[in-house]
Image (cartoon, grey):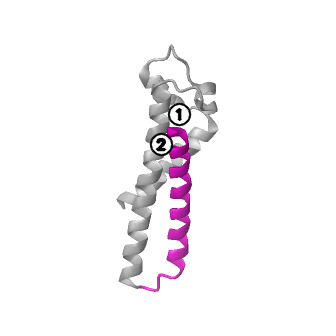
Amino acid sequence: MIIEISHFLSLLATGLFFLVGCFAFIRSGDVLISRLISRTYSHGFLFLFSSFLIYVWLAVTDNFSVAYIANHSNTDLPVFYKISSIWSAHEGSMFLWIIFLAAWGYIF
């Protein structure tokens, strides 16, 4: 069930970032639209970051029902390497870069 929650949070964040892009086209200098963009972006980042944290927790607890974790993790690995196995392949690396870009937008 926790895996589906993580997938749902990722999809919800994607939808919110899409809405941010749509709101940016109709911005026209309105303060309320700017606040809406800022809040929507911050919620999208928080949903995406919580999805990433769930994946990290699944890797640390050796939940091999997720194919990505089963392919890139091991029960004999130390915790640091289990955490770093999340971004060890192409998909995880892209997920981490999306987190970094979203964090940059959230902070600035």
| Quarter containing the C terminus | bottom left
Q: Which residue is mark 1?
A: 86
Q: Which class describes the residues within 10 Å of circle 2: few (<14), some (14-19), or many (20+)?
A: many
Q: Residue at x 62, y 40 (%)?
A: 91
The answer to whether residue 18 is above or below residue 6 is below
7 and 75: which one is in front? 7
The answer to whether residue 11 is above or below residue 51 is below
Q: Secondary structure at mark 1?
A: helix
Magenta stretch, main secondary structure class = helix
Mark 1 touching mark 2, by CB under 8 A? yes
Q: Position of residue 52 (x, y in %)?
A: 47, 42
Q: Is residue 78 left or right of residue 91?
A: left
The stretch drawn in magenta includes residue 16: yes
Q: Which residues are magenta?
A: 1-29
Q: Which residue is mark 2?
A: 52
Q: Position of residue 43 (x, y in %)?
A: 41, 60
Q: Is residue 19 left or right of residue 103?
A: right
